[in-house]
Amino acid sequence: MTRRDALRTLGGAAAAGFPHIAKPQVKRPNVLFVMTDDQRWDAMSCAGNRILRTPNMDRLAEGGVRFSEAFVTNSLCSPSRGTILTGLYSHTHGVTTNENGSHYFRVGTVNFPMLLQEAGYYTALVGKWHIASEPAGFDHWLILPGQGVYVDPVMISKGSRMQFRGHVEDVIGDQALETLKSRPKDRPFCLLYQFKAPHRTWIPARRFEKIYDSITIPEPPTFDVDLSGRPAAVRNSDMQIRDMIDFQNRGVPASLPPKERKRRNFQLFLKNYYRTLLGVDENLGRVLDYLDKEGLAENTLVIYTGDNGFFLGEYGMFDKRLMYEPSIRVPMLARYPAAIRAGQVDREHMVLNNDIHYTILDYCGVKRPAALPVHGESWRPILDGRQTPWRDSWLYEYFEYPGYHCAGKHRGVRTRRWKFIHYIQEPQEYELFDLQNDPQERRNLYSDPAHRQQADEMRRELERWRDRTGDDRSADGTSTLPCVSPKS
């Protein structure tokens, strides 16, 4: 089914008296979906961060729910963004990498803005898009080209390029507010408000440049863990903080001994990572203030997340991609005063980026075409306090190789206690972690005879997930070419 056919089906069914809007609610909610790039789960003060202060992220958490067990099913920007939009695993929607031709949606892919637009919503997108396919399903869109830049960004709207002055997060904030102010007032709205930060190269707004200068940020416990016993896909990845070149002209010359270079890079990298998030939080607050001022907050569903996690020194690393906890865990906040009880912290349910699509449609009373596969769940039943079956495992996948940072292809499955990883890229290798007794993932139990039965069960669970989601191995192809990662 093509996208056009799917939407024609929607319209035809509605005309025939079977609308794709569920029982009418008294008032359909507006939707504000907010996303950052590379923000990990604990990079906000409401999640316990003792250095970074994020009063507006905290404001959302206090007014709704914070999921502490939130994950992405592919820790890479474009694939994760595709999954959020479609509710599908990346092997199904087609955006499996950030580049190399496999970063386009498959023909006929349907996203939640398309369905909301068909149901009468005004739909808009402002900020970072970072998918090769042109935005579809939006009445208005204004996006950064590719990664965009932090200072004086160019933005694109339906083929027209516009030059802006200022820091990118302030520009995105200005344009989001302008979009809300100029929207048609007789229709509910859905705005995707998507920031560049805290993606590399971590250039903060000038007003934040000196914050944290007087402190030394503690290094994580696994900062100096030896990786020599890890699978080749991990050992050969280009993600070591000691090798970063970002700060060679800012106090970390290449001539320094590796341990000192690593220590200094870590301080500069993490401080600037946090500084860029200060700009995100401030601009989040500007839009939340607008909702309050205009009397829109009560009936607006706000979801806040990041497109993937990030290593902040664990195992000496930065970046993401690997199926280790710092890389796959993300912030996940939801506020909807009309329907979601305030002040919740959900530590019980494993929620995924796949779920966002279904949750938004559920609260908006909009159904998906029945012919589309289903790879996620709506959070509405659990937020309503209903007893409902919930996932006890989920599938992870990563397919970009060769590519930036040279992390090998892999799949895995995670439960609340166990994690199993199969590295597809030759040489094929495996990891098994007991997250209950080893939350920092220091000890691979895969070859431990005492855990042979558990490893076999997790391998079977991985295959069950692949069968359920129609994973046909089309992205498995391995390469014998050496992977040379660009250094910037």
Image (cartoon, grey):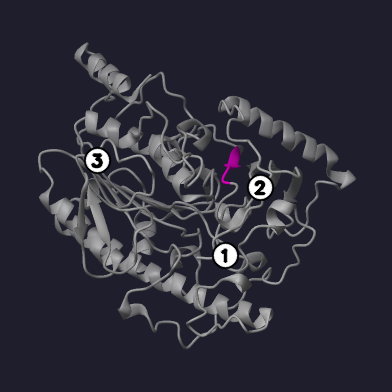
Amino acid carrying label 1: it is: Phe
Q: Is residue 41 magenta?
A: no
Q: Label 2: state its secondary structure.
A: loop
- Asked if one can make out residue 385 in the rendered structure from this viewpoint, the answer is no
Which residue carries the number 3 mark? 29
Mark 1 is surrounded, within 10 Å at the Cα level, by few (under 14), some (14 to 19) or many (20 or more) other residues, namely: many
293 and 35: which is toward the camera: 35
Q: Nearer the viewer, residue 187 or 39?
A: 39
Cα–Cα span, label 1 and label 3: 38 Å
What whole-number distance in Å separates the C-alpha atoms at marks 3 and 2?
Answer: 51 Å
Residue at disc 3, secondary structure: loop
Towards the viewer: 103 or 217: 103
- Res. 219 image quadrant: bottom right
Callout 1 touching callout 3 (CB < 8 Å): no
- Identified by mark 3, the residue type is Pro
Q: Which residues are magenta?
A: 394-400
**Badge 2 is on which residue?**
481
State whether residue 174 is above or below residue 166. above
Q: Dot 3 surroundings within 10 Å: few (below 14), some, or many (20 or more)? A: many
Who comes first in sequence, dot 1 or dot 3?
3
Residue 302: x percent and y percent?
32, 49
Relative image position of residue 479 (x, y in whole percent): 65, 42
Does any portion of residue 484 appear in the rendered image?
A: yes
Please name which of the two marks, 3 or 2, marks the residue nearer to the observer.
Answer: 2
Give the label on residue 318, or none.
1
Left or right: residue 430 versus residue 400 is right
Image coordinates of residue 464 in percent, x first then y, are 66, 28
Q: Secondary structure at mark 1?
A: loop
Q: Earlier in the sequence, mark 1 or mark 2?
A: 1
Q: Residue furthest right?
A: 449
Q: Tell me the residue at 34%/67% (across/down).
A: 150
